[in-house]
Image (cartoon, helix red, strand yellow):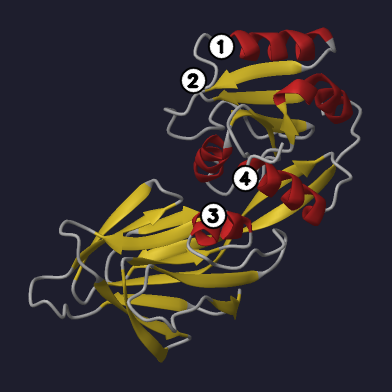
Amino acid sequence: MDRFFILTNDSKDPDHSFTKEVMEYLEGAGCRCEEVHTWQEQICDQAGPDLAGACLLVLGGDGTVLDAAARLKGLTLPVFAINLGTLGYLAEVERNGWKEALDKLIADDYELADRMMLEGTQAGRNNTAYALNDVVISRSGALRLISINIYVDGQFLNTINADGIIVATPTGSTAYNLSAGGPIVEPTGDIIVITPICSQSMYARSLVFSASDQIILELAHSSHGDDNEAEASFDGRRMMLLREGDRIEIRKSERITRMVRISRQSFLQTLHKKLYRAEGFY
Protein backbone atom coordinates (compact mmCIF):
# COMPACT_ATOMS: atom_id res chain seq x y z
CA MET A 1 0.00 0.00 0.00
CA ASP A 2 1.23 3.49 -0.79
CA ARG A 3 -1.85 5.70 -0.41
CA PHE A 4 -3.70 6.37 2.83
CA PHE A 5 -6.89 8.25 3.60
CA ILE A 6 -6.82 8.97 7.33
CA LEU A 7 -9.97 9.28 9.42
CA THR A 8 -9.41 10.43 13.01
CA ASN A 9 -11.78 10.35 15.96
CA ASP A 10 -11.38 13.91 17.26
CA SER A 11 -12.33 12.93 20.80
CA LYS A 12 -9.53 10.34 20.91
CA ASP A 13 -6.89 12.58 19.33
CA PRO A 14 -8.21 16.11 20.01
CA ASP A 15 -5.14 18.04 18.84
CA HIS A 16 -4.40 15.56 16.04
CA SER A 17 -0.86 15.17 17.34
CA PHE A 18 -0.96 11.40 16.86
CA THR A 19 -2.53 11.84 13.42
CA LYS A 20 0.30 14.16 12.38
CA GLU A 21 2.88 11.68 13.68
CA VAL A 22 1.29 8.90 11.64
CA MET A 23 1.14 11.05 8.51
CA GLU A 24 4.77 12.12 8.85
CA TYR A 25 5.83 8.50 9.26
CA LEU A 26 3.94 7.40 6.15
CA GLU A 27 5.11 10.32 4.06
CA GLY A 28 8.66 9.63 5.18
CA ALA A 29 8.23 6.15 3.71
CA GLY A 30 7.16 7.64 0.37
CA CYS A 31 3.38 7.19 0.80
CA ARG A 32 0.66 9.65 -0.11
CA CYS A 33 -1.57 10.73 2.80
CA GLU A 34 -4.78 12.67 2.95
CA GLU A 35 -7.00 13.43 5.93
CA VAL A 36 -10.73 12.96 5.56
CA HIS A 37 -13.40 14.10 7.98
CA THR A 38 -16.55 12.50 9.41
CA TRP A 39 -18.65 15.44 8.34
CA GLN A 40 -18.02 14.80 4.65
CA GLU A 41 -21.06 13.60 2.74
CA GLN A 42 -18.96 10.73 1.42
CA ILE A 43 -15.71 9.80 3.04
CA CYS A 44 -13.97 9.06 -0.26
CA ASP A 45 -15.00 12.14 -2.25
CA GLN A 46 -11.30 12.92 -2.55
CA ALA A 47 -10.30 9.41 -3.57
CA GLY A 48 -10.99 9.59 -7.27
CA PRO A 49 -11.50 6.53 -9.48
CA ASP A 50 -8.09 4.98 -8.95
CA LEU A 51 -7.94 3.28 -5.54
CA ALA A 52 -5.24 0.72 -6.31
CA GLY A 53 -2.86 0.47 -3.37
CA ALA A 54 -5.09 2.69 -1.22
CA CYS A 55 -6.35 2.15 2.32
CA LEU A 56 -8.65 3.94 4.73
CA LEU A 57 -6.66 4.27 7.96
CA VAL A 58 -8.96 4.74 10.94
CA LEU A 59 -7.54 6.25 14.14
CA GLY A 60 -10.09 5.65 16.88
CA GLY A 61 -12.31 2.94 18.29
CA ASP A 62 -15.05 0.69 16.96
CA GLY A 63 -17.48 3.59 16.62
CA THR A 64 -15.14 5.34 14.20
CA VAL A 65 -14.83 2.16 12.12
CA LEU A 66 -18.63 1.83 11.97
CA ASP A 67 -18.91 5.46 10.91
CA ALA A 68 -16.37 4.84 8.17
CA ALA A 69 -18.20 1.72 6.94
CA ALA A 70 -21.41 3.73 6.59
CA ARG A 71 -19.74 6.58 4.74
CA LEU A 72 -17.93 4.34 2.26
CA LYS A 73 -21.34 3.87 0.61
CA GLY A 74 -20.43 0.50 -0.89
CA LEU A 75 -16.94 1.49 -2.04
CA THR A 76 -14.68 -1.47 -1.20
CA LEU A 77 -11.75 0.59 0.04
CA PRO A 78 -9.83 -1.57 2.55
CA VAL A 79 -10.13 -0.38 6.14
CA PHE A 80 -7.37 -0.63 8.75
CA ALA A 81 -7.93 0.60 12.31
CA ILE A 82 -5.48 1.61 15.02
CA ASN A 83 -7.31 1.41 18.33
CA LEU A 84 -7.38 4.61 20.37
CA GLY A 85 -10.45 3.52 22.31
CA THR A 86 -11.13 0.76 24.83
CA LEU A 87 -11.82 -2.79 23.58
CA GLY A 88 -11.61 -2.14 19.86
CA TYR A 89 -12.92 -5.42 18.45
CA LEU A 90 -12.74 -3.96 14.94
CA ALA A 91 -9.24 -2.56 15.34
CA GLU A 92 -6.37 -4.63 14.06
CA VAL A 93 -3.66 -3.10 16.23
CA GLU A 94 -3.22 -1.14 19.45
CA ARG A 95 -1.61 2.27 19.58
CA ASN A 96 1.68 0.97 20.95
CA GLY A 97 2.25 -1.16 17.86
CA TRP A 98 1.32 1.26 15.12
CA LYS A 99 4.73 1.69 13.45
CA GLU A 100 5.30 -2.04 13.02
CA ALA A 101 1.74 -2.35 11.66
CA LEU A 102 2.19 0.40 9.09
CA ASP A 103 5.51 -1.13 7.99
CA LYS A 104 3.58 -4.30 7.12
CA LEU A 105 0.99 -2.37 5.13
CA ILE A 106 3.68 -0.53 3.19
CA ALA A 107 5.41 -3.86 2.46
CA ASP A 108 2.10 -5.42 1.33
CA ASP A 109 2.37 -7.96 4.14
CA TYR A 110 -1.34 -8.26 4.91
CA GLU A 111 -4.55 -10.10 4.09
CA LEU A 112 -8.04 -8.82 3.25
CA ALA A 113 -11.20 -10.07 4.95
CA ASP A 114 -14.67 -9.17 3.74
CA ARG A 115 -17.35 -8.56 6.38
CA MET A 116 -21.02 -8.85 5.53
CA MET A 117 -23.36 -5.92 6.11
CA LEU A 118 -27.11 -5.62 6.61
CA GLU A 119 -29.53 -3.32 4.87
CA GLY A 120 -32.89 -2.40 6.31
CA THR A 121 -35.81 -0.80 4.50
CA GLN A 122 -38.86 0.72 6.11
CA ALA A 123 -41.73 -0.94 4.25
CA GLY A 124 -43.77 1.39 2.07
CA ARG A 125 -41.15 4.13 2.19
CA ASN A 126 -38.03 4.89 0.23
CA ASN A 127 -35.96 4.71 3.38
CA THR A 128 -32.99 2.32 3.46
CA ALA A 129 -29.98 2.25 5.77
CA TYR A 130 -26.96 -0.03 6.21
CA ALA A 131 -25.15 -1.60 9.17
CA LEU A 132 -21.88 -3.44 9.68
CA ASN A 133 -22.73 -4.41 13.27
CA ASP A 134 -26.47 -4.45 13.85
CA VAL A 135 -29.96 -3.13 13.38
CA VAL A 136 -31.65 -2.47 16.73
CA ILE A 137 -35.32 -1.78 17.35
CA SER A 138 -35.85 -0.28 20.79
CA ARG A 139 -38.66 1.41 22.67
CA SER A 140 -39.21 5.12 22.29
CA GLY A 141 -40.70 7.35 24.96
CA ALA A 142 -42.31 5.67 27.98
CA LEU A 143 -40.42 2.86 29.74
CA ARG A 144 -42.73 0.09 28.56
CA LEU A 145 -42.22 -3.16 26.72
CA ILE A 146 -42.84 -3.17 23.00
CA SER A 147 -44.33 -6.04 21.01
CA ILE A 148 -42.54 -7.11 17.84
CA ASN A 149 -43.74 -9.66 15.29
CA ILE A 150 -40.94 -11.60 13.61
CA TYR A 151 -41.30 -12.96 10.06
CA VAL A 152 -38.65 -15.00 8.25
CA ASP A 153 -38.92 -15.34 4.47
CA GLY A 154 -42.55 -14.28 4.68
CA GLN A 155 -43.54 -16.78 7.38
CA PHE A 156 -44.64 -15.63 10.83
CA LEU A 157 -42.27 -16.91 13.50
CA ASN A 158 -43.15 -15.36 16.84
CA THR A 159 -44.13 -12.24 18.77
CA ILE A 160 -41.77 -11.05 21.47
CA ASN A 161 -42.50 -8.58 24.25
CA ALA A 162 -39.26 -6.91 25.20
CA ASP A 163 -37.33 -3.67 25.50
CA GLY A 164 -36.29 -4.27 21.90
CA ILE A 165 -34.61 -6.63 19.48
CA ILE A 166 -31.17 -6.86 17.86
CA VAL A 167 -30.47 -8.16 14.36
CA ALA A 168 -26.70 -8.63 14.17
CA THR A 169 -24.07 -9.63 11.66
CA PRO A 170 -21.22 -11.94 12.69
CA THR A 171 -19.09 -8.80 13.11
CA GLY A 172 -21.74 -7.32 15.40
CA SER A 173 -22.07 -10.47 17.48
CA THR A 174 -19.44 -9.13 19.92
CA ALA A 175 -21.22 -5.78 20.29
CA TYR A 176 -24.73 -5.14 21.69
CA ASN A 177 -25.68 -8.72 20.84
CA LEU A 178 -23.07 -10.02 23.28
CA SER A 179 -24.22 -7.65 26.03
CA ALA A 180 -27.78 -8.90 25.56
CA GLY A 181 -26.71 -12.53 25.98
CA GLY A 182 -26.45 -13.43 22.31
CA PRO A 183 -23.92 -15.86 20.80
CA ILE A 184 -20.45 -14.92 19.59
CA VAL A 185 -19.97 -15.70 15.90
CA GLU A 186 -16.79 -15.94 13.84
CA PRO A 187 -16.71 -12.52 12.12
CA THR A 188 -16.24 -13.70 8.54
CA GLY A 189 -19.29 -15.96 8.79
CA ASP A 190 -22.40 -15.60 6.67
CA ILE A 191 -25.33 -15.66 9.09
CA ILE A 192 -27.81 -13.35 10.82
CA VAL A 193 -28.39 -13.40 14.59
CA ILE A 194 -31.62 -12.17 16.23
CA THR A 195 -31.46 -11.47 19.97
CA PRO A 196 -34.26 -10.06 22.18
CA ILE A 197 -33.37 -7.27 24.63
CA CYS A 198 -34.67 -7.93 28.16
CA SER A 199 -37.58 -10.07 27.02
CA GLN A 200 -40.61 -10.61 29.23
CA SER A 201 -40.44 -14.32 28.47
CA MET A 202 -37.89 -16.49 30.24
CA TYR A 203 -37.88 -18.72 27.16
CA ALA A 204 -36.81 -16.01 24.72
CA ARG A 205 -33.47 -16.93 23.18
CA SER A 206 -31.28 -15.81 20.31
CA LEU A 207 -32.07 -17.19 16.88
CA VAL A 208 -29.55 -17.82 14.12
CA PHE A 209 -30.53 -17.72 10.44
CA SER A 210 -28.87 -18.05 7.08
CA ALA A 211 -27.68 -14.78 5.56
CA SER A 212 -29.92 -15.52 2.58
CA ASP A 213 -33.05 -15.21 4.77
CA GLN A 214 -35.14 -12.05 4.80
CA ILE A 215 -36.12 -10.85 8.25
CA ILE A 216 -39.19 -8.66 8.77
CA LEU A 217 -39.79 -7.00 12.12
CA GLU A 218 -43.24 -5.49 12.64
CA LEU A 219 -44.21 -3.24 15.52
CA ALA A 220 -47.27 -5.03 16.87
CA HIS A 221 -50.34 -3.81 18.78
CA SER A 222 -49.55 -2.45 22.22
CA SER A 223 -50.90 -4.46 25.17
CA HIS A 224 -51.05 -1.36 27.37
CA GLY A 225 -53.54 0.39 25.12
CA ASP A 226 -51.40 3.37 24.08
CA ASP A 227 -49.85 3.92 20.70
CA ASN A 228 -46.81 1.70 20.28
CA GLU A 229 -43.70 3.63 19.21
CA ALA A 230 -40.14 2.51 18.65
CA GLU A 231 -36.91 3.49 16.94
CA ALA A 232 -34.79 1.48 14.54
CA SER A 233 -31.09 2.35 14.65
CA PHE A 234 -28.34 1.19 12.31
CA ASP A 235 -24.97 0.79 14.03
CA GLY A 236 -26.28 3.19 16.67
CA ARG A 237 -26.60 6.05 14.21
CA ARG A 238 -29.20 6.23 11.47
CA MET A 239 -32.66 6.28 13.08
CA MET A 240 -36.10 5.38 11.75
CA LEU A 241 -39.21 6.15 13.79
CA LEU A 242 -41.68 3.25 13.89
CA ARG A 243 -45.36 3.33 14.80
CA GLU A 244 -47.75 0.46 15.32
CA GLY A 245 -47.99 -1.63 12.15
CA ASP A 246 -44.73 -0.34 10.64
CA ARG A 247 -42.27 -2.90 9.31
CA ILE A 248 -38.52 -3.03 8.79
CA GLU A 249 -37.33 -5.48 6.12
CA ILE A 250 -33.77 -6.63 6.87
CA ARG A 251 -31.53 -8.63 4.57
CA LYS A 252 -27.90 -9.23 3.75
CA SER A 253 -26.59 -6.28 1.75
CA GLU A 254 -24.61 -6.42 -1.44
CA ARG A 255 -22.31 -3.94 0.28
CA ILE A 256 -19.38 -5.27 2.27
CA THR A 257 -16.72 -3.78 4.51
CA ARG A 258 -13.25 -4.93 3.54
CA MET A 259 -10.95 -5.15 6.56
CA VAL A 260 -7.15 -5.33 6.43
CA ARG A 261 -5.57 -8.06 8.55
CA ILE A 262 -1.91 -8.22 9.56
CA SER A 263 -2.22 -10.35 12.67
CA ARG A 264 -1.56 -14.05 12.53
CA GLN A 265 -3.68 -14.55 15.65
CA SER A 266 -6.84 -16.57 15.24
CA PHE A 267 -10.25 -15.13 16.03
CA LEU A 268 -10.35 -17.19 19.22
CA GLN A 269 -7.00 -15.82 20.38
CA THR A 270 -8.14 -12.27 19.73
CA LEU A 271 -11.46 -12.90 21.45
CA HIS A 272 -9.74 -14.34 24.51
CA LYS A 273 -7.46 -11.32 24.76
CA LYS A 274 -10.27 -8.77 24.33
CA LEU A 275 -12.63 -10.46 26.77
CA TYR A 276 -10.01 -10.79 29.45
CA ARG A 277 -9.11 -7.12 29.10
CA ALA A 278 -12.80 -6.21 29.39
CA GLU A 279 -13.02 -8.16 32.63
CA GLY A 280 -9.92 -6.43 34.00
CA PHE A 281 -7.68 -9.49 34.22
CA TYR A 282 -4.85 -7.67 32.45
Q: Which residue is drawn at the image coordinates 64% and 9% (left, top)?
A: 20
Residue 111: x and y in percent read: 85, 45
Q: Which residue is mark 3?
A: 133
Q: Which residue is drawn at the image coordinates 69% and 17% (left, top)?
A: 33
Specify the farthest residue to the bottom: 155
- Quadrant occupied by the N terminus: top right
Callout 1, which amino acid?
His
| Quadrant in the picture for residue 273 | top right
State the residue in front, 229 or 27: 229
- Whole-Å distance between the Cαs marked 1 and 4? 30 Å
Circle 2 residues within 10 Å: few <14, some 14–19, many ≥20: some
| Quadrant in the picture for residue 150 | bottom left
Mark 2 lies on a secondary structure that is: loop
Q: Earlier in the sequence, mark 3 or mark 4?
A: 3
Instruction: Tell me if residue 247 comes above or below residue 63 in the rendering.
Output: below
Q: Earlier in the sequence, mark 4 or mark 2?
A: 2
- Whole-Å distance between the Cαs marked 1 and 2? 7 Å
- Whole-Å distance between the Cαs marked 3 and 1? 27 Å
What's the mark number on residue 16? 1
In the shown orientation, is residue 27 left or right of residue 200? right
